[in-house]
Image (tube, rainbow, N blue to C red):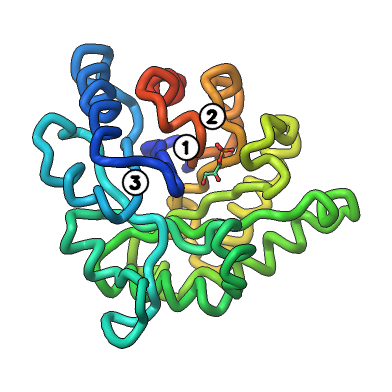
């Protein structure tokens, strides 16, 4: 069943990127059109300040745009925040919610992440909902339980009728160059799959589960072929067209 899922590779630029960075995307788009057709949906989540430039730039066609976060409210007195409908208006089709850096830096709870995912769905966006354990939780043998709790709390019921993507990102693997073994990734992704099927039935069998955390050109091929890994969420390696293209081509 899972073999019919079209993989998705998303680049999370985090707080990196100015207008000039779009040259990387033009280069990537060039690679994607001249090389073998990508076997994955390609998404880039730049800072909100340049999102509209990607979405409206014909030279980067084939690359879909996503936000990195959204507020749970549609509009209102929330200085500095961006709503899901604003991202959609700027041309986004996806939005990352519940990234561990948001959970850590802004104290976001599962409940808030769920509300953001609901807002995203309401605005016509596809939320990429992030979950993942700390190193201490893994060492204590609690990784699966922690992730199960995050999934239960962060994924809205609306996921049954709408496209929602899950991204498993072990916190200790983000930006560290360390990754879990393929066996551990497989075990976690299988556990997530079981939980999605338990809650959403057949729909749960078709939802993408991305892996994120030090996904690089060097390890992408082996990680992306692990069972129930339906693509990747890439941080650092998505900033350079050549590296990101190599990861996309590894699908
Ligand atoms: P790195 O690929 O830089 O480890 O970041 C992963 C990540 O946090 C993507 O959301």
N-terminal-most mark, 2 or 3? 3
* First reached walking from the N terminus: tag 1 or tag 3: 3
Taking the image in four quarters, ligand 1 sits in the one at: top right
User: Residue 123, relative to residue 128: is it above or below?
Assistant: below
Does residue 189 sit above or below 127 in this rendering?
A: above
Any part of residue 251 in sight: no
Residue under the point 59% across and 49% down: 168
- Which quarter of the figure is the C terminus placed in? top left
Q: Position of residue 12 (x, y in %)?
A: 43, 44
Which residue is drawn at the image coordinates 60% and 75% (left, top)? 109
Task: State whether residue 205 is above or below residue 174.
Answer: below
The residue under label 3 is 46
**Residue 175 location (% of width, % of height):** 62, 38
Can you name the residue that lies furthest to the right here? Answer: 140
Secondary element under disc 2, as helix, strand or loop, is helix
Residue behind mark 2: 224
Measured as percent of width and height from the top left, residue 145 is found at 76, 62
In the rendered view, tell whether residue 51 sits above or below residue 125.
Answer: above
Where on the picture, by quarter, is residue 228?
top right
Whether tag 1 and tag 2 are in contact, CB under 8 A, the answer is: yes
Q: Which residue is mark 1?
A: 231
2 vs 3, front mark: 3
Q: Is mark 3 within 8 Å of ligand 1?
A: no
Q: Nearer the viewer, mark 1 or mark 3?
A: 3
> Toward the viewer: 143 or 69?
69
């Amino acid at each position: 069943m899972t073999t019919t899922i079209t993989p998705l590779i998303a680049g999370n630029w985090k707080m990196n990127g100015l207008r000039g960075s779009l040259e990387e995307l033009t280069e990537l788009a060039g690679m994607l059109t001249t090389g073998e057709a990508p076997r994955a949906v390609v998404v880039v989540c730049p800072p909100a300040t340049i999102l509209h430039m990607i979405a409206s730039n014909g030279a980067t066609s084939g690359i879909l745009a996503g936000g990195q976060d959204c507020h749970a409210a549609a509009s209102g007195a929330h200085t500095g925040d961006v709503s899901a409908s604003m991202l959609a208006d700027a041309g986004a089709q996806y939005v990352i919610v519940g990234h561990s850096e948001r959970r850590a830096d802004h104290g976001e709870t599962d409940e808030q992440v769920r509300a953001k995912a609901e807002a995203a769905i309401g605005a016509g966006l596809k939320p990429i909902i992030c979950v993942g354990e700390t190193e201490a939780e893994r060492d204590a043998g609690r990784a699966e339980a922690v992730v199960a709790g995050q999934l239960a709390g962060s994924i809205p019921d609306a996921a049954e009728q709408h496209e929602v993507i899950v991204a498993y990102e072990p916190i200790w693997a983000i930006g560290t160059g360390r990754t879990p073994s393929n066996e551990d990734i497989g075990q976690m992704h299988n556990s997530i799959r079981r939980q999605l099927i338990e809650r959403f039935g057949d729909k749960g069998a078709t939802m993408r589960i991305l892996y994120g955390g030090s996904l690089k050109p060097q390890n992408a091929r082996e990680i992306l072929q692990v069972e129930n890994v339906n693509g990747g969420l890439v941080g650092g390696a998505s900033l350079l067209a050549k590296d990101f293209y190599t990861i996309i081509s590894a699908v």
